[in-house]
Amino acid sequence: MTTTLARPRVSADSYDDAPRVSDNGQFANEQDARGYEWRHSTVVAGAPWKNPVGTASGTFNLEACGRFYDVSQMGAVSTKGVSPIPWEGNPTPRTAESPSGMVNAVGLQNPGVDHYLVDELPKLKALGATVITNVAGHSDDDYAQVVEKLADSAADMLEINVSCPNVSHGGLSVGSDPLVLGRLIERLRKLTTKPMVVKLTPNVTDIVPIARAAVDAGADALSLINTLIGVKIDVETGNPVIANVTGGVSGPAIKPIAVAMVWKTRQALPHIPIIGIGGISTAEDALEHLYAGANAVEVGAAALLDPVAPLRIAEDLERALDKRPELAEKLRNGQTWR
Ligand SMILES: Cc1cc2nc3c(=O)[nH]c(=O)nc-3n(C[C@H](O)[C@H](O)[C@H](O)COP(=O)(O)O)c2cc1C
């Protein structure tokens, strides 16, 4: 059975046949919205994805995105980072445009794991979404508390964001030191049987020893990359635009860096599932990550420009994979192009 996908009213001519989002945010035709059968699925660390495209953490929010499309149609949705207690985030301004991208220092603002467990997670699961819960922490204990609380939850996968500044590691991110990262992942591994994805930071000299340390300590998959450190200066005032001074650079500008890191990691670790992230705003961008060796991808900053970008990319990739049966078959079987 094949019906139309849930899409927003962003362009009346291209989306005429789509189920409609009503004023209260519900799909006018839930049956249609959920009835679509994807032809090209993938599997990441044993977790089935309807298609190879997910949303990237921090750029997806059910309240906002659910008004535009049926979120259950994504391969998976990665939530905003969840911390042990509510975090307010950084002072404003927190975002700025940059050439072919943006800089952000939102600072992991979120209402905390207890709220997440009774609010966003049950809502996402009720809609039928495959959920990757992104985990944030400023110390090893923070991560452990969150993972412990998520262990028996309905989350399909956990994604450990090891880019956060860590007080147990002198303010550096744990993801920048293989020994420190290995120790953390070993501790978390004992707390959960859920597929555990470790999300790597690109702000390192060589990603390979870091990736290897995560895998040796028990990671079931890797996602890469998080944002690159950047600063934007206001040339009228001579001061940084972002209150936090530094932020994370994302968007098309970082795609070649992300693809290089996926490539290098795949060469070094032929069997670990990889989710490619960074600069994906078209199906061709997604294909670059997949041909570099990723099993799936996540779309980040592109969704801030066009909320429906992740679903559009998934649909375009579906057609692109029709023409690439060898790649499609590998992904379906949990294998990769290289
Ligand atoms: C506004 C914003 C907030 C983000 N918040 C998180 C977060 O909470 N946890 C995380 O692991 N990554 C976070 N990221 C990083 C993205 O998930 C992604 O790794 C990065 O932006 C690169 O992908 P892109 O070029 O497609 O945006 C955030 C990115 C942006 C732009």
Image: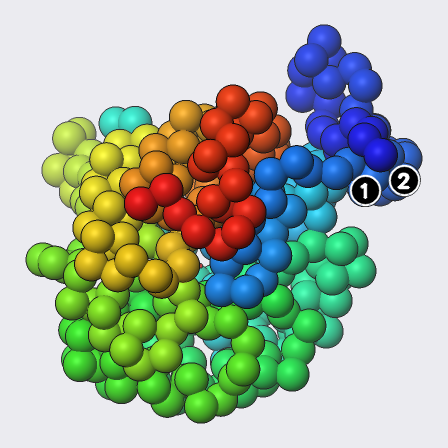
Image coords of residue 319 (percent x, y): 58, 24
- Toward the viewer: 223 or 15? 223
Image coords of residue 81 (percent x, y): 48, 64
Q: Residues within 10 Å of mark 1 (few under 14, many from 20)?
A: many
Depicted 242 relative to depicted 162: above or below: above
**On the image, numbered disc 2 is attached to which residue?**
31
**Residue drawn at point x = 47 percent, y = 44 percent:** 330
Q: Is residue 85 visible?
A: no
Indicate if the residue with disc 1 has its beta carbon within 8 Å of ligand 1. no
Q: Write down the quadrant of residue 208 in the picture.
A: bottom left
Image coords of residue 310 (percent x, y): 55, 36
Q: Quick check: 131 left or right of 197?
A: right
**Residue drawn at point x = 23 percent, y = 74 percent:** 213
Depicted 130 relative to depicted 114: above or below: above
Depicted 57 relative to depicted 7: above or below: below
**Residue drawn at point x = 28 percent, y = 48 percent:** 262
**On the image, numbered disc 1 is attached to which residue?**
34
Q: Amino acid at mark 1?
A: Arg
Q: Please identify the quadrant where the C terminus is shown.
A: top left
The type of colouring in the image is rainbow
- Toward the viewer: 88 or 281? 281
Q: CA distance from mark 2 to mark 1?
A: 5 Å
- Toward the viewer: 142 or 1? 1
How many circles with numbers are drawn on the protein? Answer: 2
Q: Amino acid at mark 2?
A: Gln
Q: Are marks 2 and 1 in contact (CB under 8 Å)?
A: yes
Q: Quick check: 245 left or right of 323?
A: left
Q: Quick check: 333 left or right of 24?
A: left
**Residue at the left extreme, as displayed:** 205
Image coords of residue 186 (percent x, y): 34, 86
